[in-house]
Image (tube, rainbow, N blue to C red):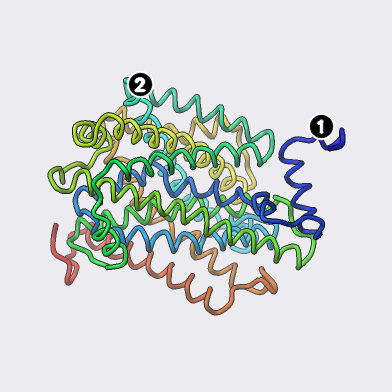
Amino acid sequence: MTDALARQGLTERTNAAIGEVLAGRRSGGRSALLFAGPAVVASIAYIDPGNFATNIQAGAAYGYTLLWVVLVANLIAMLFQALSAKVGIVTGRNLAELCRERFSPPVVYAMWAASEVAAMATDLAEFLGGAIGLSLLFHLPLLAGMVATAIITYGLLMIQGRGFRPMEMVIGALVALIGICYLVEMFLAPVAWGQAGLHAILPQMPDAAALTISVGIIGATVMPHALYLHSGLTQDRAPGADLQGRRMLLRYSNRECIAALAAAGAINMAMVIMASAAFHAGHRDVSEIQTAYHTLTPLLGYGAAGVFLVSLMASGISSSTVGTMAGQMIMQGFVGFRIPVWLRRLVTMAPAFVVIGMGVNATYALVLSQVVLSFALPIPMIALVLFTRSRAVMGPFANNRLTDIAAIGGSVIILFLNAVLLLQTFGVPIPGLPAS
């Protein structure tokens, strides 16, 4: 290693190595690890505390019945994260920037406002989740857990100043920690694997309350801010200098999306499976994270309850950090305005302090935030479909017919579920769906 290379930071060395792969001077299985990072960072949005809240409710109340919803949501997430990454790689701009360039100012400002609401709803769930995990694990008041979470996430955000690679590695380590925690839970919980496998592929919707939870699962799985974020993470990361380079980047990106989102999906399904195995038989009313923790202790032991809290804490801290990064990207992309990270962190965590100050149940706030997200979700989804199918934007990388059909179908599913939930909210009976 030369002295100049030794003096380079981790990000610079990664970019240089990626350049060698794109130029054909480096190959081998380990080269794929150089391209890993953006989808791993985005994947934390799919295993944030909002997922904990909705998945615990789904498993406790309906057993394995709603596992198929988690699977469908994850498949939709894979597709749209891949499209988001493609936008950044091909155009060199993120999704919010493209919206500002291609849409009229009134549309842009409306999209920005809706996206900011979604970002705040996201951070409400992530910030509260981390605070709940810290407060229960270390026996702190919830407010103290919130302050500790704020300090830790701000510290993690400072890593961003060292380039993309250190942040990718820190978030990747936290994702791995969450995965290990749920792998342990699977050995501790009495899982009926046959039932779990059957309901993962057998669509059922028991009643209206299950529909509300299902929309919450989708809102917690396919995240609006993650669609904006992924395009920004790929736009400046070792850009391809020509068509061949961009094609190679897209191949690596698609593989990473499949691997990272498959892992996130497996963790989500493990959450439902654990809640079903632990609570469904005799504790169907478990609907709060705190109650789940206290109920797990006598059912599966202190080890299972402790592992659950560690995973929740890692999820909340990492996802809150990534959520702040996404919020910065959304604001800068839509309106070209950037505020200091500490101010962004302060603004996005303020709703959580307000919610707790008003005495609102923390887990209820988490689930409600996921429903809000599901209503904001069609905005970036529709924008992605429009841009990635346009040859004027994507050139030869525009979607093929099969991808187009899948993307439009995913958007239609989200819009349909939102319409059904809206009717349900206003007391309109849904034909064929029993009342809860």
At numbered mark 1, what does the secondary structure look like: helix, strand or loop?
A: helix
At numbered mark 2, what does the secondary structure look like: helix, strand or loop?
A: loop
Task: Give, as a three-letter code, the residue at label 2.
Answer: Phe
Q: How would you rate the neighbour count of disc 1 (Cα within 10 Å): few for under 14, some for 14-19, many for 20 or more? A: few
Quadrant in which the C terminus appears: bottom left
Q: In the rendered view, does 92 fall on the left or right side of 317?
A: right
User: What's the residue at 38%, 29% (across, down)?
Assistant: 131
Q: In the rendered view, does 424 fall on the left or right side of 328?
A: left
Looking at the picture, how far across and down is residue 128, in whole percent?
37, 34
Query: Which of the 4 image quarters holds residue 386?
Result: bottom right
**Which residue in the structure is indicated by mark 1?**
7
In this view, the residue in front, 358 or 151, is 151
Query: Which of the 4 image quarters holds residue 130?
Result: top left
Q: In the rendered view, does 6 fall on the left or right side of 115?
A: right
Which numbered disc, 1 or 2, marks the residue that appears first in the sequence? 1
User: What's the residue at 53%, 41% (across, down)?
Assistant: 322
Circle number at residue 138: 2
User: What's the residue at 27%, 60% (across, down)?
Assistant: 421
Question: Could you give the CA–CA distance between mark 1 and mark 2, rounded to whole angstroms?
Answer: 40 Å
Task: Give, as a three-letter code, the residue at label 1.
Answer: Arg
Looking at the picture, how far across and down is residue 285, in whole percent?
16, 43
In this view, the residue in front, 10 or 150, is 10
